[in-house]
Image (cartoon, rainbow, N blue to C red):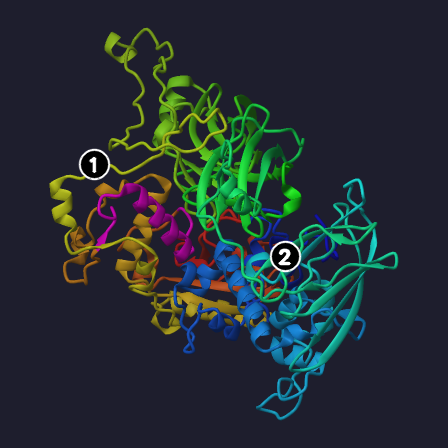
């Protein structure tokens, strides 16, 4: 695939994902090819003008996509219930930029900016993707000013002058128009012309110079444009997007193609033979009716009847081969899904890695997907053309590299410990680093196991959208394992392992059953026989599980998925009138962020600390001061469900707390009507929306409940690079998170993360005790 211009030394593929990664790189700057630990600062970034996150969103842009209201409150769309939730989640921010892309794509079409696509303005080719990036920078007014559009588009109604072509950082729109030109934004609209160049023998022509002529008589200008491009290593030109009914002609070595008309609602793929400039997929004349559509893609019939030959000529029979992304070897006996006319259908490759005899209608789009956790994972889309007839379409499954972080239930990294990764019938031993991390590579959609030598404890699926998998190990199970084995092993954890995927909620796959019992070590002779024969307590699974089949690469053998537990009549009766858990609860019982409500003497200590930060040029955003005990209750049990410490079926009601006798009740159904899988998934979403770590104080015990804690975000992060005076008036150069924490201690304002891990703890949290 073609790669576009490098952004800070990194070049990205010319597809929609590449565009998003490149834009984040330019704005934050992030490197979304790496995990969220690396991109932590970019995710949480707030610049001096208040723009936030990977893509530096301002208030107006957030209102445009429905994340904010005019009054400035968060709507909860896609889980964005607060600024902290937005800035803590890669997924929420990427969902936002996808909405922005589609919104600007539509606006630019409606307002006629697409009449300029293909024109050279001030030495820059105007493209769909470049314009969308430019509008994200300065809005449509700045784009209209750069294009010098007629009428009032370029005039700022408030000032009566032309819109500025610069953003607040003095970046000119021309930089974005050029840097982000030529990306194929795929699904933002169907107006895409894709051209592949071949020679007479069907071989691709790479690095071939092609002139592209386009003409259109429109509202703003009567245009005849010419641009020149070279084909990439696959013989493909950059995607062509023009105004509907624009006429396009390609010229190669002085030979011109027939005229191609840009359709308003079609993806138009063509193969062109350079020697005679013939277009392999002939275009229907204007006004020609669409071919009759089939109901669904199906297997090749054995012998079509003569009456069906006319309709069959509109169909193409082809084969599909799935290849490993790194080795390009065919993958045999693998399940995948084809989405055709909006309907998914599962298939499986044969022993040669090929799915034979697929029939589809010319002009239709096919999407190839692998299984995910709850949703399909799109791998590639293509449009059916005549040139596919009786050929093998080769599709490479991406190899995804991600990080597994292993922690105990207190959030402490399980470091320097050997685990095993089970993948494609092989076992590989890996040792966690000092932060409990290990790297894993797998094909997207494939299943891998995690556990100890010879014993996979749970199975997970490789998700291309997830860069971090956190596996939490129950402390009691660790202690039992250590007692039984006398080593720093996690062999006995089994069911007590849970997964959390960086705010991505998926199904948790059940570990395989281990029938062999762990034998105890030989005990001292003083022990009784009863003591000597005592087995370590096996991790307990509280409820029976329901099974369902899901894809694995091992010849289609099913895996077991944690499902709904049993529901008792008493449980059902207790849940009557309660509302199921979910992100909607995050809006309830909001924190109070008023500094004045802190209790003395902590209030005075914080005031002095804040004054020192302000003097040092560090901006402070106060997120929380007083937390209602109801919110603490919700946060506490959300974290415990995610870590596996609490079973949704056995969580006490808020009013069961003695201190809650006169407080408003929390009418939440943690079980989601007895659907435990949904309950755990919703807890994951709530945890991401709250922006909390694994350690949360129990209700009525939090310093936030007592007015003795404050959550605040410092910019730059922990004041690094600034000089701050401690309580004795001595200047301290802040070189690390620890430096700032030590300064806070002198004011008797203690940070939660006393060990100053990076990243670690609860970054915004300061209190009278550090808890």
Q: Residue at the spot x=88%, y=59% of the render?
A: 254
- The spot of residue 583 in percent (x, y) is 34, 57
Dot 2: within a 10 Å radius of its alpha carbon, few (fewer than 14), some, or many (20 or more) residues? many
Asked if the magenta segment contains residue 620, the reply would be no
Residue 734: give x, y in percent of width and height: 62, 59
Tell me where residue 188 sits by quadrant: bottom right
Q: Earlier in the sequence, mark 2 or mark 1?
A: 2
Between the C-alphas of marks 2 and 1, the distance is 52 Å
Which of the pair 235/6 is nearer the observer?
A: 235
Q: Position of residue 723 (x, y in %)?
A: 63, 65
Farthest residue, direction front? 306
| Along the viewing direction, whichever of 407 and 291 lies nearer the viewer | 291
Residue at 37% from the left image edge and 21% from the top image edge: 483
The residue that mark 2 highlights is 268
Magenta stretch: give its range.
668-694
* Viewer-side residue, 624 vs 508: 508
Q: Is residue 687 visible?
A: yes
Q: Image check: 151 left or right of 529?
A: right
Q: Is residue 735 above or below residue 246?
A: above
Is label 1 in a helix, a strand or a loop? loop
Q: Is residue 16 above or below residue 498?
A: below
Pointers 2 and 1 in contact (C-beta within 8 Å): no
Front position in the image: 440 or 730: 440
Q: Nearer the viewer, mark 2 or mark 1?
A: 2
The local secondary structure at tag 2 comes to strand
Query: In the rendering, at what x and y percent does residue 234 appear?
Result: 74, 45
The residue that mark 1 highlights is 566
In the image, what residue occupies the spot 71% across and 79% down? 147
Is residue 463 something that shows in the picture? no
Viewed as shown, does residue 445 lie left or right of 149? left
Please say if 688 is above or below 246: above
């Amino acid at each position: 695939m073609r790669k576009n211009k490098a952004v800070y030394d990194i070049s990205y593929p010319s597809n929609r994902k590449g565009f998003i990664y490149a834009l984040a790189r330019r704005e934050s700057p992030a490197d979304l090819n790496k995990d969220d630990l690396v991109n932590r600062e970019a995710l949480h970034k707030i610049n001096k003008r208040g723009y936030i996150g990977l893509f530096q969103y301002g208030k107006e842009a957030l209102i445009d996509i429905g994340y904010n209201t005019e009054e400035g409150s968060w709507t909860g769309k896609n889980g964005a219930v607060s600024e902290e939730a937005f800035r803590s989640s890669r997924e929420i921010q990427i969902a936002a930029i996808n909405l922005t892309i589609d919104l600007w794509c539509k606006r630019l079409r409606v307002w006629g900016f697409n009449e300029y696509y293909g024109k050279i303005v001030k030495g820059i080719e105007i493209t769909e993707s470049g314009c969308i990036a430019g509008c994200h920078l300065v809005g449509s007014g700045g784009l209209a000013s750069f294009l010098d559009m007629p009428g009032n588009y370029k005039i700022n109604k408030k000032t009566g002058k032309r819109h500025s072509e610069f953003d607040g950082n003095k970046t000119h729109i021309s930089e974005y128009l050029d840097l982000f030109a030529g990306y194929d934004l795929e699904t933002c609209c169907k107006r895409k012309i894709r051209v592949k160049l071949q020679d007479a023998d069907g071989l691709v022509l790479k690095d071939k110079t092609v002139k592209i002529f386009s003409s259109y008589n429109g509202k703003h200008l009567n245009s005849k444009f010419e641009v020149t491009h070279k084909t990439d290593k696959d013989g493909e030109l950059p995607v062509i997007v023009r105004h509907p009914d624009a006429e396009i002609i390609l010229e190669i070595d002085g030979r011109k193609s027939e005229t191609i008309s840009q359709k308003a609602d079609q993806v138009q793929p063509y193969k062109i033979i350079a020697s005679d400039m013939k277009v392999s997929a002939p275009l229907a004349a204007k006004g020609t009716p669409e071919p009759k559509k089939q109901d669904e893609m199906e297997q090749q019939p054995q012998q079509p009847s003569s009456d069906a030959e006319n309709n069959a000529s509109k169909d193409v029979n082809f084969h599909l081969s799935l290849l490993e992304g790194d080795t390009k070897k065919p993958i045999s006996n693998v399940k995948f899904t084809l989405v055709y006319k909006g309907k998914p259908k599962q298939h499986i490759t044969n022993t040669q890695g090929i799915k034979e005899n697929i029939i589809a209608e010319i002009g239709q789009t096919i999407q190839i997907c692998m299984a995910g956790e709850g949703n399909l994972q799109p791998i590639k889309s293509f449009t059916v053309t005549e040139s596919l007839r009786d050929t093998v379409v080769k599709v490479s499954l991406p190899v995804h590299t991600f990080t597994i972080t292993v922690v105990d239930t207190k959030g402490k990294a399980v470091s320097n410990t050997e685990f095993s990764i089970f993948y494609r019938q092989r076992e590989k031993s890996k040792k966690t680093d000092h932060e409990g991390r290990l790297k894993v590579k797998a094909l997207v959609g494939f299943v891998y196991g995690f556990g100890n030598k010879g014993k996979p404890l749970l199975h997970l699926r490789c998700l291309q959208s997830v860069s971090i998998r956190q596996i939490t190990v129950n402390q009691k199970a660790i202690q039992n394992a250590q007692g039984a084995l006398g080593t720093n092993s996690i062999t006995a954890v089994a069911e007590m392992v849970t997964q959390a995927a960086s705010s991505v909620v998926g199904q948790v796959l059940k570990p395989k059953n281990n029938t062999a019992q762990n034998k105890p070590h030989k005990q001292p002779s003083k022990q009784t026989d009863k003591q000597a024969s005592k087995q370590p307590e096996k991790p307990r699974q509280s409820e029976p599980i329901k099974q369902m089949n899901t894809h694995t690469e091992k010849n289609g053998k099913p895996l077991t998925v944690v499902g709904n537990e049993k529901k008792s009549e008493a449980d059902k009766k207790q849940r009557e009138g309660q509302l199921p858990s979910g992100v909607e609860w995050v809006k309830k019982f909001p924190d109070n962020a008023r500094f004045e409500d802190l209790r003395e003497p902590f209030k005075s200590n914080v005031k002095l600390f804040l004054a020192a930060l302000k003097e040092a040029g560090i901006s402070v955003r106060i997120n929380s001061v007083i937390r209602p005990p109801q919110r603490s209750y919700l946060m506490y049990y959300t974290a415990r469900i995610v870590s596996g410490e609490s079973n949704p079926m056995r969580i006490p009601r808020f009013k069961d707390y003695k201190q809650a006798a006169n407080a408003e009740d929390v009418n939440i159904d943690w079980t989601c009507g007895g659907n435990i899988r949904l309950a755990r998934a919703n807890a994951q979403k709530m945890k991401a929306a709250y922006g909390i770590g694994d350690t949360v104080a129990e209700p009525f015990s939090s310093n936030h409940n007592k007015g003795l804690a404050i959550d605040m975000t410092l910019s730059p992060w922990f004041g690094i690079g600034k000089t701050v005076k401690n309580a004795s008036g001595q200047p301290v150069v802040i070189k690390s998170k620890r430096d700032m924490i030590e300064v806070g201690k002198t004011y008797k304002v203690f940070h939660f993360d006393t060990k100053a891990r990076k990243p670690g703890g609860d970054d915004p949290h300061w209190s009278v005790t550090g808890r």
